[in-house]
Image (cartoon, helix red, strand yellow):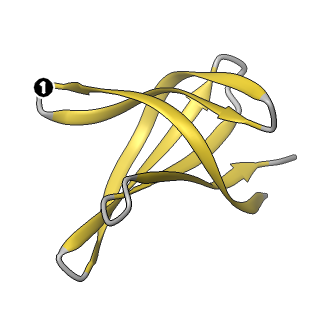
Amino acid sequence: MYQDIEEPVDVIAVFENGAMKPLRFRWNGRAIKIKRVTGTWKADVGQSKIRYFAVLDQASNFFQLAYDERNTSWVLNKIWVE
């Protein structure tokens, strides 16, 4: 099941072929390397956007990250827990 987290995180991302791609993030004192981005989508917030990323780490744990263009910040929205 999904667990809502809604905590700010630090993310290292690159722009690849004109698209933002997160590479790793820090949460609860540990660095998590992203193995694969499994989905992306965006939501309009006024004239800005929030960009969402569904990602898997090296152990295939699922995380949902969000980048908010309004304040250039990242949030860990959800994780998958068994």
Location of residue 5 in the rendering, given as x and y in whole percent from the top left corner: 73, 59
State the residue at coordinates (80%, 31%): 29
Q: In this view, does 62 lie above or below 7?
A: above
Quarter of the figure with the N terminus: bottom right
Q: In this view, does 27 lie to the left or right of 77?
A: right
Q: In this view, does 77 lie above or below 53?
A: below
State the residue at coordinates (35%, 48%): 40
Location of residue 35 in the rendering, given as x and y in whole percent from the top left corner: 53, 19
Q: Residue furthest front?
A: 71
Q: Is residue 70 left or right of residue 7?
A: left
State the residue at coordinates (37%, 53%): 72
Q: Is residue 77 left or right of residue 53?
A: right
Q: Is mark 1 on a helix, strand or loop?
A: loop
Q: Which residue lies furthest to the bottom in this view?
A: 46
Q: Residues within 10 Å of mark 1 (few under 14, many from 20)?
A: few
Which quadrant of the view contains residue 51? Answer: bottom left
Q: In this view, does 8 lie above or below 15?
A: below
Type of amino acid at the residue the image marks with label 1:
Asn
Asked whether 45 or 58 is in front, the reply is: 45
Location of residue 67 in the rendering, given as x and y in whole percent from the top left corner: 41, 53
- Residue under numbered circle 1: 17
